[in-house]
Amino acid sequence: MEWCLKPAAVIGIAYLLGSIPFGYLIVRAMQGADVRETGSGGTGATNVSRRAGKAAGVVTLILDALKGAGAVAIVKVLLGLPVFATDQAGGQAGPAPQFWDAKGAQWWVAAAAIAVIVGHIFPVWLRFRGGKGVATGVGVFLMLAPIAVAMAALVFVVVVASTRYVSLGSVLAAVAIPLFVLLQHIFVRPVESLTPILSTAVMGAALIVFAHRENIRRLIGGQESKFQ
């Protein structure tokens, strides 16, 4: 029974951690208001910045990223995997967990990584209406594929600097991460557990694009707000 309960527990932990609505709590504490009534209606750093200032937005960004990174770290510890160690040859990195091998456990890490992003976008505490998942996704992939995150960050900076649309930069950066993971694996160095990580990147990007669906409609219609 333990072999079944532990993976279920880590996914639940990841979802609940992702559900902590830091942006909502910060704006509520500072202004007694619901940040979801402002701008894009999300609880992320950009919307918090619009409502409570850039400092509050930066704090939200950091805390949301820490949720993603923390969820991956906690899950790896609970499953008996090394938190930071990598095996460039793609083999087993460290001792195998008791009820599954290390490669199988990586799929549970992938599931938990998606769960923390889902928790941020659909938090149980806010009736499943949260943020867009970008900062939390950054935290996740800083733990899983930091080189891909660095390259995606360049995409984000270039797009936002040239257009002033944070939503456009976020969507393009999220979509670019799976591509950068694959390019890293082919041209730079092998990515440990490529298939689980690449699957996580594709699903994470899909979730982030879905969360930005209204922003995308406004971008197409020329009605999206630019970041000041």
Image (cartoon, rainbow, N blue to C red):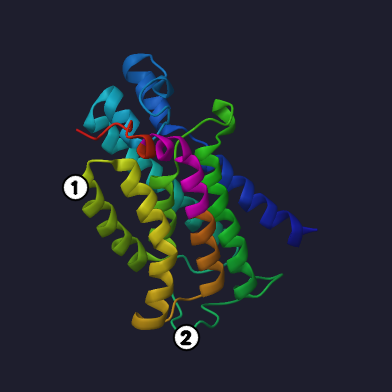
Residue sitting at x 60%, y 63%: 79
Q: Give the alpha-carbon distance from disc 2 to disc 1, as whole Å.
A: 38 Å
Q: Main secondary structure of the magenta part?
A: helix
Which residue position is annotated with label 2? 89
Is residue 62 left or right of 158 when viewed as pictured? Answer: right
Which residue position is annotated with label 1? 161
Is residue 215 left or right of 117 when viewed as pictured? Answer: left
Query: Which quadrant of the figure contains the C terminus?
Result: top left
The vertical placement of 22 against 207, above or below, is above
- Viewer-proximal residue among 178 and 144: 178
Question: Residue 151 appears in which quarter of the rendering?
Answer: bottom left
Query: Which quadrant of the figure contains the N terminus?
Result: bottom right
Horizontal and vertical percent for residue 168? 33, 45
What amino acid does circle 1 point to?
Ala
* Residue 61 among magenta residues: no
Residue sitting at x 55%, y 53%: 114
- Viewer-proximal residue among 143 and 76: 143
Magenta span covers which residues? 205-218
Residue sitting at x 57%, y 61%: 109
Q: Is residue 84 visible?
A: no
Callout 1: SS:
helix
Horizontal and vertical percent for residue 125? 56, 28
